[in-house]
Image: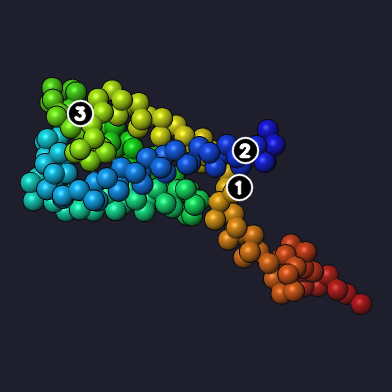
């Protein structure tokens, strides 16, 4: 497969999970924090003293991860964090099914919008797969690529590869 095609696949594959993170984070960040804390409490995983801090921090974490993912900034680290976050969401959703906990709202897109657990599991698995595809197909069309290209330029616009090595200029 040509590098251009791989770059386009990588770009498209990272946009959907990025959109999901920014959209879900925005919905939660603009809703009352107590509503999201209540949705988190339904999982019966976290102690009550952590519910409000998680409910406050998670939406902003999702928004920043989504923006960095879309831009392709700190590409490898962000992909790993996004895959880990969606995996954590999967584990939490599966744990409710295994423990027989019925969720009124999973809180994934805030408390005002709720999908079935099955739909949320599919969204998370799809996001994990797309991030893995994007990570596999490289950094083309990312800020990381742009930064690397500009950092590779030396004086006079010549790349460091094209500069003569010390000792090559023997007389």
Q: In this view, does 82 lie to the left or right of 102?
A: right
Q: What mark, if any, has residue 6 been given in the picture? A: 2
| SS label for mark 1 | loop
Q: Is residue 95 above or below residue 5?
A: above
Q: Which of 24 and 7 is in front in this view?
A: 24
Q: What mark, if any, has residue 95 been given in the picture? A: 3
Cα distance, mark 1 to mark 3?
A: 37 Å
Q: Which of 146 and 158 is in front in this view?
A: 146
Q: In this view, does 86 lie above or below 144?
A: above
- The answer to whether the residues at label 1 and label 2 have Cβ atoms under 8 Å apart is yes
Q: How many marks?
A: 3
| SS label for mark 3 | helix
Q: Residues within 10 Å of mark 1 (few under 14, many from 20)?
A: many
Q: Quadrant of residue 105?
A: top left
- The answer to whether the residues at label 1 and label 3 have Cβ atoms under 8 Å apart is no
Q: Quadrant of the C terminus?
A: bottom right
**Which badge, 1 or 3, is on the more N-terminal residue?**
3
**Which badge, 2 or 3, is on the more N-terminal residue?**
2
Cα distance, mark 1 to mark 2?
A: 8 Å
Residue 147 in view: yes
How far across and how far down the image is residue 87, in percent? Answer: 33, 35
């Amino acid at each position: 497969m040509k590098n251009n095609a791989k770059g386009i696949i990588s770009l498209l594959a990272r946009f959907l999970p990025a959109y999901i993170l920014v959209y879900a984070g925005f919905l939660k960040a603009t809703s009352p924090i107590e509503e999201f804390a209540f949705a988190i409490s339904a999982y019966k995983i976290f102690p009550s003293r952590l519910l409000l801090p998680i409910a406050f921090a998670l939406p902003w974490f999702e928004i920043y991860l989504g923006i960095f993912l879309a831009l392709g900034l700190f590409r490898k680290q962000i992909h790993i964090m996004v895959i880990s976050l969606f995996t954590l969401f999967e584990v939490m959703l599966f744990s409710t099914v295994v423990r027989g906990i019925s969720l009124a709202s999973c809180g994934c897109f805030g408390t005002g919008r709720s999908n079935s657990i099955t739909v949320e599991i599919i969204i998370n698995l799809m996001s994990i797969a797309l991030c893995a595809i994007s990570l596999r197909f490289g950094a083309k069309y990312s800020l990381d690529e742009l930064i690397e290209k500009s950092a590779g330029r030396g004086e006079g616009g010549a790349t460091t590869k094209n500069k003569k090595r010390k000792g090559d200029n023997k007389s």
